[in-house]
Image: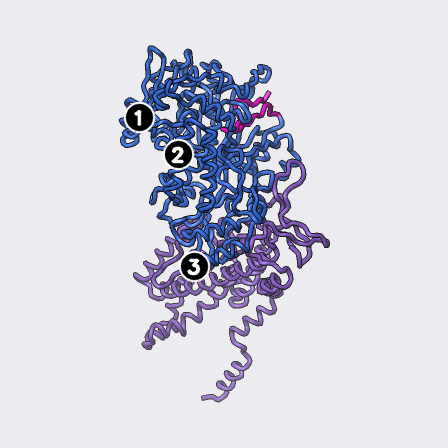
Chain colours: A blue, B purple
Amino acid sequence: MSRSTRRGAFAAATVALALTAAACSSSDGGSSSDPSTSSSASGSSAFQPQHKGGTLKLVAHAAAGSFDPQVNYTLQYWQLYQSMYDGLLSFKKVGGQSSFTVVPDLAAAMPKVTNGGKTYTFTLRKGITFSNGKALTTDDVVASFQRIFKVSSPTAGTFYNGIVGATACLKTPASCTLKGGVTGDATANTVTINLTAPDSEFPYKLAVPHASIVPKDSPTKDAGTKPLPTTGPYMAASYDPNRALKLVRNPHFKEWSREAEPQGYPDQIDYTFGQTVESEVTAVENGQADWMFDPPPADRLNEIGTKYTSQAHVNPLTAFWYATLNVNSAPFNNKLARQAINWAVDRSAVVRLYGGPNLASPACTILPPGFPGHVDSCDYTKGGGTTWTAADLAKAKALVKQSGTAGQEVGIVVQDDDVNKSIGQYLQSLLTQLGYKATLKPLSANIQFTYIQNTKNKVQLALTSWYQDYPAASDFLNVLLSCAAFHPGSDSSINISGFCDKGIDAKMQTALKTAQTDPTAANKQWGAIDQEFMEQSPLVPLINPKIIDFTSKRLGNYQFSKQFYMLVGQLWVK
Amino acid sequence: MSTVAPELATAEARRSPGPWRTAGADLLRNRSALAAAVVLFLVVLATLCAPLYAAHIAHTDPFQSHVSGTTVVDGKTVPVLTPSSTGLGLGVTPIGPTWDPAHYFLGADNQGRDVMARLLYGGRTSLFIGFTAALLTCALGTVVGVVAGYAGGVVDAVISRVLDVIWAFPVYLLAICLSVVLLTDGLHLGPLTVEAGSLWLPVAIIAAIYVPYIARPLRGQVLVLRNKEYIQAAVGSGAPTARILRREVLPNVLPTAIVFVPLMTALAMLTESALSFLSVGVQPPDASWGTIIEDGLGLLYTRPAVTIAPGLLIALTTAALNVLGDGVRDALDPGARLRGGV
């Protein structure tokens, strides 16, 4: 996932991934996977009725826009959707590495994969009812997949474009039928999804909120502030983005799979918007709120880390902050100039600016540590080695001189919040030291991400970040640096550097194919591709961040899912 | 005909020191104004010495990040930015005031830069923008006010409506809007080009938004003046308009415009600080007192000196400018003191 909230991530459990991928991937014989295989990594703890009840109070500076699960693309609400909406498959609702495991949710079992990995057949569970009292049917499933295109879901063209009929749906969303792509058989209670080509990551794509199943009569436009009926333990009673969101128990919910959709503990979840981050901290300290969404401000970190140690939960994220270098315009159309920046950046300085070594670690590669395909290597550290130790400013200056780019102007575009701006100021200072004429352009977070993607804005260097959507190396490398991800003149050109190397692109396609049959071998290929990218230096990895969840004293049963973070519905307030 | 009268007149002229000299003497007798002038002088002198302080005392570049830098406190080498080592070890704290002029006298900001050195450089910027913008405002306002008041008719109507439109906007809102637009691409007015990061940009914006504050009272003054007998006589005798404006009108409105200079300087400084605090004024790595306050905002709980020091200097300088402005007004227009205004 792109940022949007600076919280999100997970470190992929290679073992869990392998198990899951193996379970989901097909063989020509069409073997059906056993649900127990994919869910065996870590069992969910039993429900403890003595902790049931109470009101959980959450606070955030701002709401995250539309509450439509097929439209919203923020971790702020994806975190909540885990206790509200369900897909055919789901990431396991547990803490730790097992949270990367995909398990059957509305489907009774993992899909039967046939036709060389191109056909997925699901059998629906029986007896599941939406919060509006209507029973879940195969028609709802088919309509929900059509709705992904009808509402122009942000990932319709990237996650679900491989479904047969998706091309037509992307062209004319209003008349989307996904003919031949998604079909339901009410009698057999099955749903079949046909793909145009095998996709080893398809189970992950079915487990994210954009593939949530909603009633077939849901509006075919963004539901906005009118929440749709849910299948999970909670439903939205009211939502006002300027004030609050109120979740209450879904009266029709009956737990069908503790690992896919466990029943929640609090009776009610109140999410209040509009406070400043400073007052959020104070509210949690005083017990007026149970959890704050926003990262605590820099000047309160020490206080939280010393006085409220038992209430602060720090978890690493599979994400990275990086500086994009525009490879299509001067000075960074020169590889030596790009490599110079990679040599010059003092990652430990960026770690300090982010909040210190316990909140971030220096990054050397595009794939975060612990992520599938990650290889410990560091091309740009003084003295060499597999981890970053120090910058080499002398080498960087020599490369700048050799490139003949010294004295050129470089504009740095950053978001205008404290952390981004301070890292931007550091980069500006560094570029000035290297001999460039650097200027800093802080932009509102609302527009910066789209601004830096559009080549018309001629952005030379931008500070941004990437948080995984699901645990696969392609979600970083293929998404961020493939030729297909570069769309000149568009606000949706996630390949911000504009890097396109046909040779590396071909290798990524090979790795994607390999992943269908041999995830381990594919991950080795991704690791090598990561190093090839770093040699070309289209970007500068800066840090791998961590997240702090600051909770109230009364809060219990904190669990951190590496996929969707703190499990809100599993928290105790009693 | 008596021959005594010319002699008396000559003697009278010899005794009278003239209006400017009288005003100067009055100003020197005003202790409050004198004290304010001394404070201002010291502030200006200190800020002018910024390069000397940075290069020869603090030995630092206040525009360069020193995030991983070290300094010496009590003979020990310590990091400028120290990661927390207690509890969960969250957060990083810049070094606080050491009260040692050679080593982070007022501590460091979140980039590890010497706050004292930045404060002095920031003062140069704030004072430069404040004073230059005030001069520009007063010059423009005087020209506009005099032309509108003296020409009357359509010219006056057009100029007055334009001033009304500017006046109708809340001044900070207008300044922020202009800054946001101009900060992207700079200012391009015919042959005049001001780059986006230039200090002249906030100068131009602040000067423009305050023009009505000068032009309107001066226009009113000129409206009264142009009906005075000596102006009418000059017009009747066929004197050219330019000469009348230069010799008869301007000398009468100039004291008012001069009274405005220190007051507008204070106002312009406050506006610049507000804009810079909101990130739409002075752009990094340049420093002004407003940007330093903004830098210190994230350190309010741990290093309040970063915010308090420039805040105090802004308060001190604007207070001094206001007191001095009052003194100048009293000196140039003693009647205004009785009327309670300019």
- Residue type, label 3: Ala
User: Badge 3 sits on which subunit?
Assistant: B
Find numbered disc 1 in the image and state the secondary structure of the residue it sits on: loop
Q: Does the magenta stretch include residue A570?
A: yes
Residue drawn where x is 36% and y is 27% of the image: A198
What distance separates the C-alpha of mark 3 from that of mark 2? 58 Å
Instruction: Kindly report which numbered mark, 2 or 1, lies closer to the viewer in this rendering.
Output: 2
In this rendering, the answer to whether B280 lies above or below A308 is below
What distance separates the C-alpha of mark 2 from that of mark 1? 22 Å
> In x, y percent, where is residue A182?
32, 21
Q: Does the magenta stretch include residue B190?
A: no
- Which residue carries the number 3 mark? B204
Q: For residue A510, which numbered disc appears in the image?
A: 2
The region drawn magenta spans A554-574
- Residue type, label 2: Thr
Q: For residue A164, which numbered disc appears in the image?
A: 1
> In x, y percent, where is residue B217?
43, 60
